[in-house]
Amino acid sequence: MKCLEQSRGDDASSKRVAKVNVINRIPTVLLLLSVISSSSAFVPFGHQQRHVQKAAFIPSVSSTSLQATVTRPMGSSNDWEVHKFGGASLATPELYRTVGDLLLKEASGRGDGAIPTMAIVSAKGGMTDLLVKVVDSALLDFEQARIALEEAVESQIIVLKELAPPSITDPIEESFRQDGEDILSVVQSLRMIQTVPAVTMEVVTGFGEIWSAQTLNAYLMGLDVPCDWIDAREILVVKSDSSGLGEKGAASTGGVTPLYDLTTQRMEQWWKTRGKEAGFHDLDYSVESPVVVVTG
């Protein structure tokens, strides 16, 4: 697996504090680091090249065949390679295109077969700050929170519509707007309790990563290449040992314990269902490989 870390983007949500000590799911690079092996490689960072070191594969599966599938898709001669893109790399439609084209170039291989490729993406540049504003505004003025949320949703939809035809973007746009309604429901009670629990902040700001992953995947869909996206919160499961940093804050300081077996089972199930529906099982990996976009 090759892991590219671009800009970290905005990370205001990790500064919010509340007591959390439960088993949670978090959308981080741990998903890929825990279930996929890696190899070192060079990848572009702006106009430069950055060398990315090999990441260790953490054995957590009981089935030999599953371990082989997790390391590389059956039929592929290459391991999965994983890239990480921060918000600064995904601030405009042009940058989404640049990232998508880079992933396709990497997936095409280097002369020894196509390379299964994943991308872990942060929220669009500036999106996390907008969603933090939604939460903070809700403490004082719910109408201001609604306006800030509308700005956030519309800004993502504008980018989305630049990247793919309506046949692809229309259902995604509808999903974004429904997410907006869900966010309003989440923040509605904050004025009453006059505090922002860390889990609430992370739920709201996490939508930025979900929208970003779907936006990049929409661009790839428009190019008619094998692709799909994953909400890592549906796959990665951790036990949080922290009581004040929230999920992402705890993860960044080592305060969570990934539940590798359960996470691997979820990843296996995704591959058996969504991977099969996307046609990944039937690809000729000597000439093409899937590109999977994962929330970061």
Image (cartoon, rainbow, N blue to C red):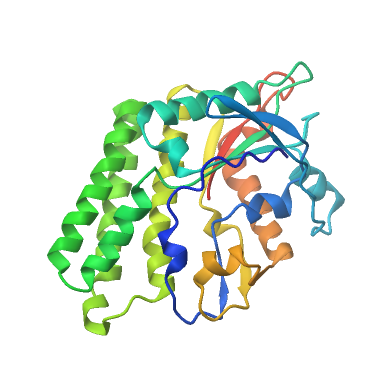
Q: Give above or below for 94 relative to 33.
A: above
- Residue at the location (83% across, 47% down)? 65
> Which quarter of the figure is the N terminus placed in?
top right
Residue 260 locus on image (x, y percent): 72, 63
Above or below 183: residue 78: above
Residue 158: x %, y % from top left: 27, 35
Determine the residue positioned at 24% across, 43% down.
154
Q: Which residue lies furthest to the right in this view?
A: 64
- Residue 264 appears in view: yes
Q: Which residue is drawn at 55% across and 54% down?
A: 232
Q: Farthest front residue? A: 48
**Residue 226, position as x, y percentages in the image:** 56, 29
Q: Which of 230 and 271 is in front in this view?
A: 230
Residue 73 left/right relative to 65:
left
Left or right: residue 125 versus residue 107 is: left
Residue at the location (30% across, 53% down)?
A: 130
The answer to whether residue 179 shows anywhere in this view is: no
Please give left or right for residue 56 compared with residue 129 in the image: right
Tell me if residue 87 comes above or below residue 262 in the rendering. above
